[in-house]
Image (cartoon, rainbow, N blue to C red):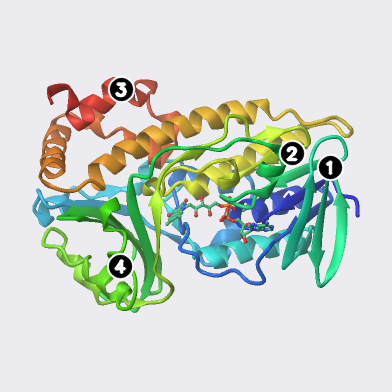
Amino acid sequence: MSYDLIIVGGGVGGGALAAVMARAGRKVLLLEKSERYEDRVRGEWIAPWGVTETRRIGLYDTLMQAGGHHITDHVTYDENLAPEECEQAALPLGIFAPDVPGPLCLGHPHHCQTLYDAAREAGAESLRPVVIEKIITGKTPSVTFTHKGESRTAHAPLIVGAEGRQSEVRAAAGIPLHQDKPHHWFAGLLIENVEGWNPTRQAIGTEDNFGFLAFPQGNGRVRVYGGYALEEKGRFAGEGGAQRFLEAFRMNCAPDNAALAAGTPAGPLFSYFNNDSWTDEPFAEDCVLIGDAAGWNDPINGLGLSITYRDVRMVSDILKETPAGKAPDFTPYAEERAERMRRLRFAGQIQAALDMEFGETARERRRLYHERKAADPTLGLHGVAIMAGPENAPAEIFTEAHRARVLGLETA
Ligand SMILES: Cc1cc2nc3c(=O)[nH]c(=O)nc-3n(C[C@H](O)[C@H](O)[C@H](O)COP(=O)(O)OP(=O)(O)OC[C@H]3O[C@@H](n4cnc5c(N)ncnc54)[C@H](O)[C@@H]3O)c2cc1C
């Protein structure tokens, strides 16, 4: 078994890279652990800059044909503001990337299956379920795995780690993962039969001890997330947890949320703590990491898929440009990714401090933020990094001076 590249993990990153490289005529082996994709409460919202990345690698039409749904405007609610005031200030989302009407939503399991099928159709050898037994990186890279009860060893000059947060390729290559401290709990649930919610409008908002996000998926489905304090670990655990979670969406500051609270759960409710992680260099001799395996951004920003699609674009471009028989140089990818993740970490910290901190001090900070931002829109520029891509926001917003301005720390 000899290939041009072996990709471990057939999620969005692995499936997309396999499809792109197989379409480019490379001999690809894609190895996926699961027998079928299930709702693990993962990303279903691609930011406008991520949509541009899907276009650049030739997968946008594939996602649209699979049922991709565009959202076109955004409302931020807040307990300090009247709902009508927030709705009048709705932000059109077609302004952030050329020819992109707004963020793109597609159910995560279906998204993964669509890419897995695209890879297979393009000629990638795609195997599932597999159990990885051994990964050897370095001089003669190989992956030994079990498939259908048979142990096999595959060889390739390059092994790609695309198997998410617990990457075995990352461990085998000895690439350290850095993580910052958890900031808040973040729970997600897919709901259906939602009546009375505008299907092209996304919304976020904070009231009392809960911050919500809602992303319509089309056909009466909405992916909802909620953030709450680290001390409230068991808040939505156990029997009745999903119903208690939906009840938390009923807010005076966002009356339309009643439509979400009345929705029917269409998947599991899972909670994660939100934080950031990163690798200094997401590659080593004969292996490279993409997507969450290379480090993830705080999901408060909803950018894991956009980050992953850019990884796929950069890594596939390097591979296509590398002459046969030469080792690819992933240094430009590593440098771009380090700065991209630094900026997004910064934007996420600001977003989390504003939306996912609770109590009197946090409420007053948000009130002042909204008041001052109305007079000085540059205070909201971290949102441009999230929607348009971190490279499209001015460098000075990723500084402590800007953080202090946004959060009012200079007067504290
Ligand atoms: C609560 C939450 C909400 C989020 N919301 C958003 C959002 O709205 N928008 C957004 O852009 N991002 C969001 N994200 C982030 C996003 O889901 C991830 O960044 C994205 O899924 C990363 O894709 P990936 O392919 O790198 O990894 P994964 O999605 O983790 O896929 C890895 C794949 O590898 C397989 N695998 C694992 N181990 C092995 C193994 N040993 N051998 C073979 N296969 C293996 C898995 O089965 C899986 O199919 C969210 C994350 C969380 C936690």
Q: How many angstroms separate mark 3 from mark 2 (CA)? A: 35 Å
Looking at the rendered structure, the secondary structure element under dot 3 is helix
Q: Residue 115 appears at what percent x and percent y?
A: 64, 60
Left or right of 174? Residue 134 is: right
Q: Find disc 3 in the rendering and name its residue.
A: 400
Dots 4, 1 in contact, CB < 8 A: no
Q: Earlier in the sequence, mark 2 or mark 4?
A: 4
Q: Disc 4 or 3, which lies upstream in sequence?
A: 4
Q: Residue at x 65, y 67 (%)?
A: 34
Q: Which residue is painted at 44% across and 41% down in the image?
A: 276
Label 2 and label 4: CA atoms lie apart by 40 Å
Query: Quick one: label 1 or label 2, which is nearer the N terminus?
Result: 1
In this figure, which residue is indicated by the disc labeled 4? 236
Query: Identity of the amino acid at label 3?
Result: Glu
Vertical side of 336 occupied by 313: above or below: below
Tell me the CA gap for discs 4 and 1: 45 Å
Query: How far is the residue under mark 4 from the one under mark 3?
Result: 35 Å
Q: Single out the mark in the foreground, 2 or 4.
A: 4
Helix, strand or loop under label 2: strand
